[in-house]
Image (cartoon, grey):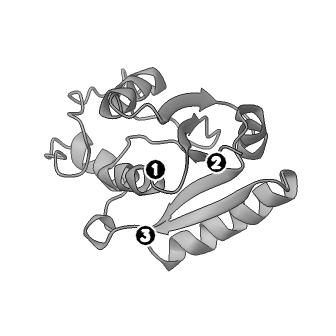
Amino acid sequence: MKRIALFPGSFDPFTNGHLDVVRRGAVLFDEIIIAIGNNSSKSRYLPVEQMVGMIEDVFRDEPRVSVQTYKGLTADFARTVGANFLLRGLRNTTDFEYENTIAQANRHMNPDLETVFLITSPALAAISSTIIREIHRFGGNVDDFVPFALPAYEAPAGS
């Protein structure tokens, strides 16, 4: 049976920490689908289509890694794409508390879905998409935190 892992998130933006989790997960799984979900409680900093293209470019030489977008429940999307594993990265105990609750709910919704946690590499543990967005929004250099160049920030109209 093919081991397919879904790596879900908003990836706004995709960070070097995310990259690390995917590369390390590629040793464990036959295929990894980076699944960019639509989080109804968040508005995006970067357009999802742009992020899909940037992540696809990062993994252009890795045929076992693909990028897809989805709406709805992660557990349902995993079933749709034939994934029996969710791949998640943990930076700290706060992440564990949050991710454990989600893992239990996903398992309830899809009993065939097993969540696999990878501890973030220490050098990348302080990186978060939220921090990167703030640095970028105010003109700071985020090159050390992301595996691609981010486009120049454009303030939303009327702000």
Q: Which residue is mark 1?
A: 26
Does 89 appear above or below 62? below
Q: Which residue is mark 3?
A: 91
Q: Which mark is residue 3?
A: 2
Crowding around mark 2 (Cα neighbors within 10 Å: few <14, some 14 to 19, many 20+) is few
Q: Is residue 137 left or right of residue 65?
A: left
Q: Residue at x 45, y 42 (%)?
A: 11
Q: Residue at x 71, y 45 (%)?
A: 1
Q: Is residue 8 left or right of residue 57?
A: right
54 or 5: nearer the viewer:
5
Earlier sequence position, callout 1 versus callout 2:
2
Q: Quadrant of residue 59?
A: top left
Residue 98 location (% of width, % of height):
62, 67
User: Gap in Å between the C-alphas at discs 1 and 3?
Assistant: 19 Å
Q: Quadrant of the C terminus?
A: top left
Q: Amino acid at mark 1?
A: Ala
* SS at circle 2: loop
